[in-house]
């Protein structure tokens, strides 16, 4: 689907951190037009007043159906559960949709229910494609509904997939560290500056909702349920996510660095680096920087650094939307 | 060795981060007297001017032998290699010494040479006691020379020892995160605010000098060389260190939390907590906070949080010196 | 009022930042006993669980009259307006009260109403003493109700009073910078880490509620309404407040530094320093560090650094309570 | 001077913070070609390895004359004093030069000598133009040598010029706050993370080298030596500078906000805002955000926020070079 005039896109839920960035990116995109950006709580506020670091001057509106009438695509940044009916409505109107919530990430409604709640539109799950761009471009290109991956799964899967695809992935420990914007705008006191300044700690040790995503997608690559431990930590920063992945290799790998460099040679948003990446290097970009190194004969460690709001959320959403609309996947991104 | 008048202590190398805190702690200690604090580079400067957060008004001096004449004990905070001759001299004069460098931590001079350089006084190694207080109080009490553990080994060993002591430790992955003061005062541009602000990354992935300490001490507990991976990371903070330790258990443990609570029930500086600790909680204290949780049947995760300058350096040095001098180990500490 | 057994103190509103610290300080105070700590929103939670950096294990309770029956004193840390009826009740029961809100700081109810709301108990204002310790010890010692100063007025007044007392204060510009804990626990998104990380900005430029306090107290010293501009800024830190005060001198001062050193020579919590103080130096202490320097003939600049939660709130509250109870003002403080 | 092929530019001193960003900006500039980037200390290192946040893969080289032979322009980012001979050489070869040091900012060599050292090439001062773009576009367009302003003067002058130009500027107090990158790469321990984390303080209270620049340029606008106090402070952040300027007005101004909006209506890199700007809003951009507000009848406060490395250094250097080369001043900038 290519056209001369820009594709009109609505961003629903644009007052949250990921939605606001999605609106900013669509607004600055050379081949998209930001038809509207919506918010229940901040309707009437200009986006660049709500987030002075952004430049998009659009006024946030309440979402109503009239807004969607001459729109071709949508990025939905609603909370988990709340996204389902909105996405269903949009899909019913024929819109191309990228959904940032977890609502369409898990293909098995029973697993969704276990980690979240009963699913409101389970029949839509069959049509949703899990949108980790570098792993599934062909399916994303033809999808009408893409479930944008969680921030942690994006980093963890980009780190683990090259081994999983080759049958080299034994078990994996994913020790992940994220800036506080990953917790969302309404996260409250737990991630306040007073609690996080000069602090860092693990959380959700007994099971984080991003684990089933990681397991599902690794199983798609290997055919078997993977043995993965995933423990998230908070960093006292705003944006940035680092996944340190300790892998028991199924068999020795001669040059794990070369394996990664080769795997991602054609991916403009994945850099395989010679030293462990810092999250600052990828801040405000859609890049994932990966470094893989052997740990003796039988293990390797793989570090993946992303900006949780970009490659981990809004950036990847635009990257996916680009593919769905027949555009270059890098259009409008840095 | 107890006495009514305070024990006179010199702190050598008091312009660095750990040495300065050691001087501050000795200065405020009710049963110690700070006889002198020395520095080659900052002689003539008052400690509380060099570090305005400290209150000790002593003027730093060049170290010379006259300073040591009526002194009973010393804390040495010299760089690795440089500590050896100073400690040898002090021991020759009969001083009780806690050394903060790595020079006396590794009992095997060959291992020291592999990670650092040829050892200048290998015969002194036999008399040195590795000073992880909670693991070795009896040996520390009677030692004349204590090698104060590195910051990472302190956290990692406190996290792993309870399992190792019971033969429950299979392999372990230690993903450690430290504030930049751990790199020392002369660390330069790599840990500058411009490079670390809003940043975090792994380093020394191919082998950090603290690994042989961890291996040596675990082997002392278990009799076998442990299978440990240790990867340090930098956090964009000043003080604080968190070790996240992923353990393959040698056999299932019914209640890993209870095991830790019991192990450290008598240790005033180790808190076993019900939730993963944040490094901020232990800042400016000698505390180590530990949380242990099962990861399925066969694994556990143990988090240990310390202030790298306190329990990871100067605080533990005073704790050890207290024991060596027959004092309550908590004297002068918080 | 001195006694052998510790004075029983209740801290009301102990889930907020200042109230929690007040409870922690009272709990650790050698001559006070923390009879209870209350919170409407966090009743049932232990203080050291709500704030893991604190050690006080008391369980927060709903405030009811029974709690106050065998209590001699209270520190109240309620929001402005909400404090008035609680303080009135406590005073009716004969309790010695330090109130952290603004409710009793302004002696003129009309001024209070202009900046806040109609005052609920204007007759209590006559008995309240404005508790900037170093300026009013005698009145505080005999007071039953002390209105603890705001954080900004504490720093600004300590900076300006030595000149005002000598008739040397012409006009003053107070450019103040505060960490985000000053905004309180409920401050929300404006002071979130996402909005404040790597950020700093002025706010309340058209008039901050702390201005009338500064004006009132300077007028008490000089007899005339002062010409003061006060503009607060946010710093991307947790605790710490720096007031940079630019003063037009009424007449030349030969040695402004000496003037300050002399004025505060007897004040254990005010340090007059030779270089501009950093807020980190006074963190987690009740200290105010002040540096005064000439700016040509007719002007001076005075910097005052405090920890907004200590000298700017809970620390000064305990300092004042100590005086009211006949104790050494430094008891229980650092 | 316009051409179809890109103008070849060398950046000398590209290992420092400002020089590195200048090289990165020139490298990504659509109408410039980065012919070479030089460094004495880091020759042989790739720029994107030295600063992983940058993308320019050029290898830094030692500066020699051969490098300059087919080059049309240069940005020089040498330390004060060291820049003079390099700039003289380049000018002798006919290069268009923007110099980031202070060496050509002060038109009076005697004033330069008082604040820095004797000037090595005083005759070059006559040809140098002080490059605060928005104040002097016409002179910059025709200049061969532009002295790029200091970071503090950039913010202070953009804040004060609209009043000065209209004869409305009485005296001014400039309370400025800067991130630590302003101190440069070699600033060392004073701006280390250990000293700056959670800290903020004034410095150079007895006179900062940026003051004579501010005075010189205001005098150019008004004809008289201005009465300006300038006190810089450090913020615990990387990039960002906020100048809070308190102005005694020469006469009342009806609508100071409107005055600023009108003055900068045509300047794409100056935003006049309705609320005080935060430094985060302009980070990694060449923007200056300004907010002006009345303080009673006779005073106003003006806040100017810039990124000290962009508009305060390398960004403005490119903006000026664009003008000197006949390009759109915004080319290659954001």
Image (cartoon, coloured by chain):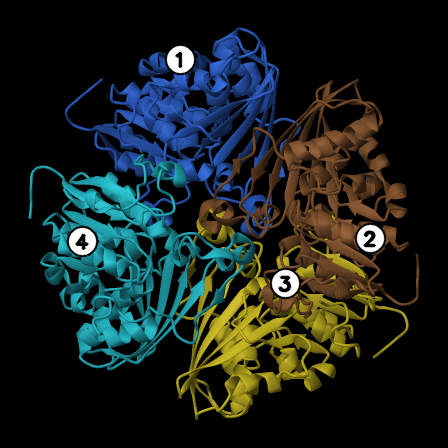
Chain colours: A yellow, B cyan, C blue, D brown
* Residue pictured at 18% horizontal, 45% vertical: B68
Q: Which residue is mark 2?
A: D92
Q: Is residue B52 visible?
A: no
* Residue B90: numbered disc: 4
Name the chain letter of the residue that bears numbered label 4. Answer: B
Discs 1, 2: same chain: no
For the residues labelled 3 and 1, the Cα–Cα distance comes to: 54 Å
Q: Nearer the viewer, mark 1 or mark 2?
A: 2
Check whether the beta carbons of the residues at disc 4 and disc 2 lie within 8 A of each other: no
**Distance of label 3 from label 4 (alpha carbons):** 67 Å
Q: Are marks 1 and 4 on the same chain?
A: no
The residue at the point 63 percent across, 59 percent down is D15
Element assignment for label 1: helix
- Which quadrant is home to the C terminus of chain B? top left
Marks 2 and 3 belong to one chain:
no
Q: CA distance from mark 1 to mark 4?
A: 64 Å
Q: CA distance from mark 2 to mark 3?
A: 62 Å
Q: Which mark is residue A78?
A: 3
């Amino acid at each position: 689907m290519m056209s001369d005039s820009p594709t009109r896109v609505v961003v629903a839920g644009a007052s949250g951190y990921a939605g606001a960035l999605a609106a900013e990116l669509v607004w600055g995109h050379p081949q998209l037009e930001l038809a509207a950006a919506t918010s229940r709580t901040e309707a009437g506020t200009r986006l660049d007043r709500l987030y002075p670091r952004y430049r998009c001057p659009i006024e946030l509106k309440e979402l109503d159906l009239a807004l969607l009438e001459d729109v071709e695509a949508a990025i939905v940044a609603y909370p988990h559960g709340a996204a389902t009916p909105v996405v269903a409505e949009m899909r019913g109107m024929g819109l191309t949709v990228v959904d940032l919530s977890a609502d369409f990430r898990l293909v098995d409604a029973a697993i969704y229910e276990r980690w979240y709640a009963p699913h409101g539109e389970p029949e839509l799950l069959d049509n949703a494609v899990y949108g980790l761009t570098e792993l599934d471009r062909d399916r994303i290109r033809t999808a009408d509904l893409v479930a944008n991956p969680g921030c942690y799964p994006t980093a963890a899967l980009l780190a683990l997939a090259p081994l999983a695809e080759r049958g080299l992935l034994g078990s994996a420990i994913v020790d992940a560290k994220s800036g506080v914007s990953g917790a969302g705008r309404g996260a409250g006191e737990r991630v306040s500056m007073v609690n996080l300044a000069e602090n860092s700690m693990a959380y959700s040790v007994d099971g984080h909702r991003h684990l089933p995503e990681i397991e599902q997608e690794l199983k798609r690559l290997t055919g078997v349920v993977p043995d993965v431990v995933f423990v998230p930590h908070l960093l006292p920063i705003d944006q940035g996510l680092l996944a340190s992945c300790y892998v028991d290799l199924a068999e020795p790998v001669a040059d794990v660095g070369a394996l990664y460099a080769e795997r991602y040679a054609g991916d403009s948003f994945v850099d395989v680096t010679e030293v462990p990446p810092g999250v600052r290097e990828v801040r405000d970009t859609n890049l994932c920087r990966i470094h893989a190194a052997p740990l003796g004969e039988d293990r390797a460690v793989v570090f993946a650094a992303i900006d949780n709001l970009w490659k981990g959320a809004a950036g990847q959403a635009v990257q996916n939307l680009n593919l769905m609309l027949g555009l270059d996947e890098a259009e409008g991104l840095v």
